[in-house]
Image (cartoon, rainbow, N blue to C red):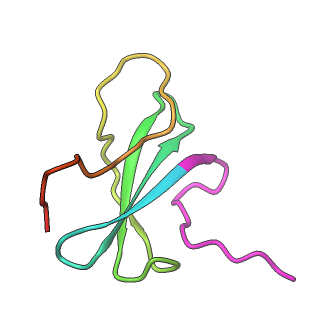
Amino acid sequence: MRRKFCLSTPDSAKQILDAGITKLPDGRFCMMYVAQENPGGIKMAFSNKINSGYACQPEQVDFERGACEAPNVFERIGENYK
């Protein structure tokens, strides 16, 4: 069985690690991932489907100067973001 990837980056030599997908209120999906670049950091990609069509955003969304770990997004108990 051939593996199918739902995200491709402009530079295939760069690794993508620890991705997490969240459904947004507008129905799109947001994939947050760790980009193994220099400087490394957390980036986002958006799609209308959960398993394909993600478009990478070039800007880094975290502003830490050092290394980073897997991004996590979760809904807070008692909050309604829908």
Task: Point out the stretch of residues depicted in magenta.
Answer: 1-18
Seen from the viewer's position, the closer of residues 20 and 75 is 75
Q: Is residue 24 above or below residue 50?
A: above
Residue at (69, 77) in percent of width and height? 4
Q: Is residue 15 above or below residue 38?
A: below
Give the total number of marks visible in the rendering.
0
Residue 12 lies within the magenta run:
yes
Residue 11, quarter of picture: bottom right
Residue at (28, 76) in percent of width and height? 28
Residue 16 lies within the magenta run:
yes
Q: Is residue 36 left or right of residue 47?
A: right
Residue placed furthest toward the top: 66
Q: Is residue 76 above or below residue 28?
A: above
Q: Position of residue 38 (x, y in %)?
A: 51, 29
> In the rendered view of the protein, which quadrant contains the C terminus?
bottom left
Instruction: Characterize the magenta stretch by its predominant secondary structure.
Output: loop
Residue 66, quarter of picture: top left
Q: Position of residue 60 (x, y in %)?
A: 33, 40
Q: Position of residue 52 (x, y in %)?
A: 51, 80
Q: Position of residue 45 (x, y in %)?
A: 38, 61
Seen from the viewer's position, the closer of residues 82 and 22 is 82
Residue at (26, 52) in percent of width and height? 75
Residue at (50, 38) in percent of width and height? 70
> In the rendered view of the protein, which quadrant contains the N terminus?
bottom right
